[in-house]
């Protein structure tokens, strides 16, 4: 493979990666903020949680103890981090 073909392949790969990253970005108005209730799925289970911190660039920290069956689920942690692309907002906090 010639140097020019290698350069072209690298440039194409970089543009493709950038396009993929831009497609995955979530609009600011669609991001959860502190106090919002979100739902998300992990390992085939549905979870509900309240957002406790939204200061991270690509995700939120949330508290899952609001679920009525939290204790029965025997989860290792009360809080978890969820990427903006992996949750939906169930209820916005009252402003």
Image: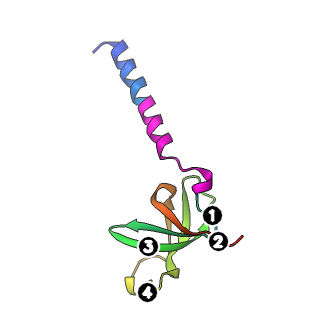
From the image, state whether disc 4 or disc 3 is nearer to you. Answer: 3
Q: CA distance from mark 1 to mark 3?
A: 17 Å
The answer to which of marks 4 and 3 sits earlier in the sequence is 3
- Separation of disc 4 and disc 2 at Cα? 24 Å
| Residue under pointer 3 | 47
Give the quadrant of residue 44: bottom left
Question: SS class of the residue under badge 3?
Answer: strand
**Mark found first going from the N terminus, 4 or 2:** 4
Q: CA distance from mark 2 to mark 3?
A: 18 Å
Quadrant of the drawing holding the N terminus: top left
Cα–Cα gap, marks 4 and 1: 25 Å
- Please name whichever residue, 89 or 71, is drawn nearer the observer in this view of the structure: 89
Residue position for label 1:
33
Name the N-terminal-most of marks 2 and 3: 3
Task: Note whether 62 is above or below 12 in the view shown.
Answer: below
Which percent across, then down, holds residue 2? 31, 12
- Tell which of 24 and 76 is nearer to you: 24
Provide the residue span drawn in magenta. 15-30
Which type of secondary structure does the marked residue at label 1 adopt? loop
| Contact? badges 1 and 2 (CB < 8 Å) | yes
Expressed as whole percent of the image width and height from the top left, the position of residue 94 reads 68, 73
Q: Secondary structure at mark 2?
A: loop
Q: Label 4, on which residue?
A: 71
Residue position marked by numbered label 2 in the rendering? 93
Q: Are marks 2 and 3 in contact (CB under 8 Å)?
A: no
Which residue appears at 58% of the width and 50% of the height?
Answer: 27
Q: Residue 95 vs residue 10: left or right?
A: right
Mark drawn on residue 89: none
């Amino acid at each position: 493979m010639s140097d020019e073909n290698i350069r072209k392949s690298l440039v194409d790969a970089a543009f493709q990666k950038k396009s993929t990253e831009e497609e995955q970005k979530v609009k600011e108005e669609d991001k959860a903020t502190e106090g919002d209730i979100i739902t998300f799925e992990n390992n085939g289970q549905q979870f509900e949680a309240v957002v406790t911190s939204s200061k991270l660039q690509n995700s939120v920290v949330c508290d899952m103890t609001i679920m009525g069956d939290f204790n029965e689920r025997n989860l290792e942690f009360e809080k978890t981090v969820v990427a903006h692309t992996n949750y939906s907002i169930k209820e916005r906090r009252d402003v």
